[in-house]
Image (spheres, rainbow, N blue to C red):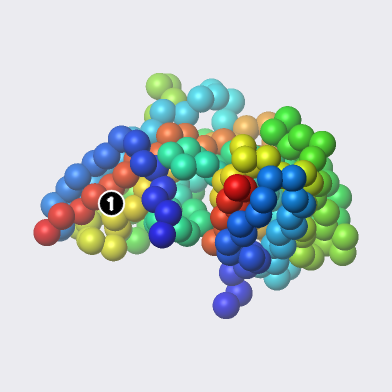
Amino acid sequence: DTGVSQNPRHKITKRGQNVTFRCDPISEHNRLYWYRQTLGQGPEFLTYFQNEAQLEKSRLLSDRFSAERPKGSFSTLEIQRTEQGDSAMYLCASSSGARQGPQYFGPGTRLTVT
Amino acid sequence: GESVGLHLPTLSVQEGDNSIINCAYSNSASDYFIWYKQESGKGPQFIIDIRSNMDKRQGQRVTVLLNKTVKHLSLQIAATQPGDSAVYFCAEIYNTDKLIFGTGTRLQVFP
């Protein structure tokens, strides 16, 4: 399968714990995006990378959130001191780099904070 | 599995009929648009895209129409099938690379 992959698919954690998600983009895609989706809503942009450089971060991305893409391939999204409001589907997408080009999404990681 | 779009607008069509899903986008400066299909528990799946210098683009069984005057997009699905049942989102890009998603529409196909 050469699509975008995300791990884990589901994560249940207790409030206050830290969690980390991984995204592997389509190979040779140099742009990688993180979105968050809550029930009944469309995905909301969090941040994106071109190669290893983080080019934009949403105001939704509080200081408890950090994303990295150290070698320009896979990316990780970490949430520290999770809160119940962090419960959502975290989606990763990748694109070839052309601004007007499709972003292809992975299956997402469903986070539940209890 | 989880349910995407619990309280979304719903379009119900009979199998074999054509479906038209509408979307109003927010920014007149948007220059690129994408339609996504999302099934329950899955990530959005790319269907078709269109640039702002076009009015119409066709794919396999799908057509996207863009009316920039009224900031309106539509997705037409020909000969709708049960496998088309899902939530459909339009998304726009302007100024940066981030997608701005519209309110989804749930498509239900009945026999």
Coordinates of residue A108 in the picture (x, y in percent): 57, 58
- Vertical position of residue B99 compared to residue A74: above or below: above
Does residue A28 sit above or below A38 in this rendering? Answer: below
Q: Which residue is pictured at 29% across the width and 55% down the height?
A: B85
Furthest residue in direction bottom, as rendered? A1
How would you rate the neighbour count of disc 1 (Cα within 10 Å): few for under 14, some for 14-19, many for 20 or more? many
Q: Position of residue B75 (x, y in %)?
A: 34, 44
Foreground residue among B14 and A40: A40
Residue A11 shown left or right of residue B44 in the figure? right
The residue carrying mark 1 is B77
Q: Is residue A27 visible?
A: yes
Residue A1 image point, x, y percent: 57, 77
B74 or A108, which lies in front? A108
User: Residue shown at 60%/74% (left/top)?
Assistant: A2
Q: Kindly identify the residue that appears in the image at 82 percent across and 36 percent down.
A: A63
Quadrant in the rendering for residue A74: bottom right
Along the viewing direction, whichever of B42 and A110 lies nearer the viewer: A110
Using the rendered view, name the quadrant where residue A83 is placed. Answer: top right
Indicate the chain on which mark 1 is placed.
B
The quarter of the picture where residue A29 lies is: bottom right
Position of residue A15 in the picture relative to residue B80 (left or right): right
**Residue type at the position of mark 1:** Ile
Q: Is residue B72 above or below residue A22?
A: above
Quadrant where the N terminus of chain B lies?
bottom left
Mark count: 1
Q: Quadrant of the image for the C terminus of chain B?
A: bottom left
